[in-house]
Amino acid sequence: MIPEISAKHRDAFKSLSAGWMRVGATCVQLLRGDEVLIGCPTSSLCNEPSLLVSSFASGLTLQIYGVTDPRWTPTAESMLDIFANLLTVDADLDNLTAALVETQDRLVALYELTQATRRTLDINSLLDLLIKQSQHLMDVDGGFVVLKEKDGKPLVHQVSERPIHPAHAEAAATLYMRDPSRHIFKDSETVPLELRNVMMVTLPVRDEISAAVGLFNKTGKFTTPDIKLAKAIAGHIGAQLENAMLHKEAVERARLETEMDIARQVQTAILPQSIPQVKGLDVFAESNPAFEVGGDFFDVSTRQDDTLVFALGDVTGKGMPAALLMSMTHTIIKSASRNMPFNHPHQVLNRLNHDMASDFSNVGMFTTVMLGLVDCANCKLHYSNAGQSPIYFIPANGEPALLEAQDIPVGILDAVEYTTQSLSLSVGDVFVAASDGFPESRNPAGEMYGYERMRTFLSASRHLPAREIASALLADVNTFCGTHPQDDDRTIVILKFEKQDEKRIMFNESLIVRATYEDIRQPCERLRANLDQAGISEEVASLCELSLQELLANLVDHAYEGDPNRQITVRMAGSQKQIFLQTEDTGVPANLKMDEVHMPEPEDLAEGGYGMAIIRSLMDEVRYDSTQGKNIWTLVKNLK
Amino acid sequence: MSLEINPTEQIIKIAAISLKGRLDAFEAPALRKTCDEYIANGFDHFVFDLTDVAMIDSAGLAVLVSVLKRARQKNGDVRLVWPREEAASRILKLTKFDQVFVSIEKSEIVPKGF
């Protein structure tokens, strides 16, 4: 290598030339090829004969004009050697200096990069920074980053004056990923057509994302130090990128939580704050929103004609969109049902569908809704059901039925003619409208609570007041779900048809006791205290107490076979109409037909068999249900 | 005519057991144990004083029937002093125990004539 010729070189050349001048030289020149590097004197007519020596190794020639004697040749050769050495040493020194300066530059640049990355948590800015710094430090035309999440579509980020086709960047990344130990690509088979050379390094972000940086068109060629530098930059940016992604996720989560909070507020705000009551009807309604608020809603209101209107629905989707459509739907139902003809709830749904169908279909959503009207004076319930499920009708005496929806949800088709169904009500009949959040609740094993389990539970709970049915059902669903979180809103409206004077609930409680003869005394004593306080006659009170005692002792003996570590749940409720007792155990199912239970004849001197016979003769109703590992006994004593 | 002397000796062991409170499944085993001991000691007549029993359940009834059966096997018997509480009395009638057991007054527990 020949360095720049400096003044120092000229001075040295001049003093050596002076010696030649003394032996008769007119001009001395150092040449590389035909180019004169140094001449002394600087300009001269050099047309005299001359002595010429060349060095093959350095490519230099020394020409001395005015001297031709070959005896001077060795001297000339020495001078050429001296100069060639001098120039080589200087060239090495220049290179070393340049390398030092470059290293220093890179350190400063890396420091600046560190500082700059600290200031940003924006993913695109970080990728920009990554490529721009690499461009600056490695003298390349541009670069790209390819990010690919597992099973995701690759994402290409580029900084370049002449961006390359994203497909080329993806292809380069794919090629590199196959063998990440190979970094430099320059042959035409592996490098995109428009590029001269490419260097790829891994961008370490997180395990589930594979990412690579490509830098292209370096002046000269990529070297091993370039790979190290690029890896250092990528490592640094990668760490910060991971922070940025975590930050972005946290922000996203916070945004979602805020949205859910607002949606929950909207939902809570429009639902009735208190449930109006009408004569002869026990009404309860509530909604338990899930974390990701669904679109459940309900409404219960009374009209001037003493009828009660109730609605329950579920807008598809979650969050704000569902909450907004729900509030519009709710408003229309509320205003339309105030003026609806007496027994035509379907007209409200027609109107709702007419008004909202385009809004719903614009956002690809719809709503199920059930609207009912209870006419206590005529013991009728009229309802119209647009796809809402489940709806149960549990007659006081009879099999509970799941009422299938007659019509399609609102918001699917423009023109739908909804229909009205009617039920005749008797005292004790229970009507339950719920959202699918109840039956479709899942346990940790993924099993659904199910429509049948819900039907069975409601059947066994029909003697409870409406509010108690709801809370017992919710408790049962929660027990079933265990640790599995609530996926969807759970909304329910329960109506229980009863005589006006039956409404007053005198007591209602439940307790859990261990299955021992000693512990079962506690619920018996509680029952007695409740009955005494409610002013129930001594005779009825002691009959009820004895029946409960007999039932519980029977469970201790037969359901749990004396195991003192098992538990029995006891529920007791009293209205002015009846006393309601219920036990729940998880022991051996009873194998007993109440119809075949009779009091032993006195002359037989039976030592057992009195317990269930006593219950049968004292209580007005004895029912036994066994499902899903639970045995439920229900005793009812009617009051005169 | 000489005097005929035909002495008849009859020793009747009567256990008079006075009960108070609830005669239910929890208490019945203790009563059964007490009665078992009397029977083992040759008692075959029992008087249960139920005057102060507030409540009887089927487990309590079972003990009374069990004692009655074993006493009768030895030609003995069981008498009941009827409970004062309606609740307890009602259940004895419901199970027709009034047709099985002979009832006596509280004053008759100790035989007269001494």
Image (cartoon, rainbow, N blue to C red):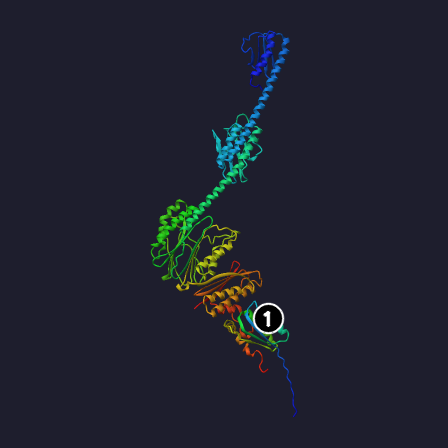
User: On screen, A506 above or below A88?
Assistant: below
Q: Quadrant of residue B76?
A: bottom right
Answer whether residue A417 is visible to the viewer in this image.
no
Answer whether residue A602 is visible to the viewer in this image.
yes
Q: Secondary structure at mark 1?
A: helix
Residue A367 spot, x, y in % from top left: 41, 50
User: On screen, A457 above or below A167?
Assistant: below
Query: Crowdedness of circle 1 by 10 Å Cα count: few (<14), some, many (20+)?
Result: some
Q: Chain of mark 1?
A: B
Residue A415 spot, x, y in % from top left: 36, 49
Q: Nearer the viewer, residue B89 or B67?
A: B89
Q: Which residue is mark 1?
A: B32
User: On screen, A294 above or below A625?
Assistant: above
Quarter of the figure that contains the N terminus of chain A: top right
Residue A438 in the figure: left or right of residue A62: left
Residue A382 spot, x, y in % from top left: 38, 57
Q: Nearer the viewer, residue A111 or A570?
A: A111
Residue B49 in the figure: left or right of residue A455: right
Callout 1 amino acid: Arg
Residue A511 spot, x, y in % from top left: 51, 61
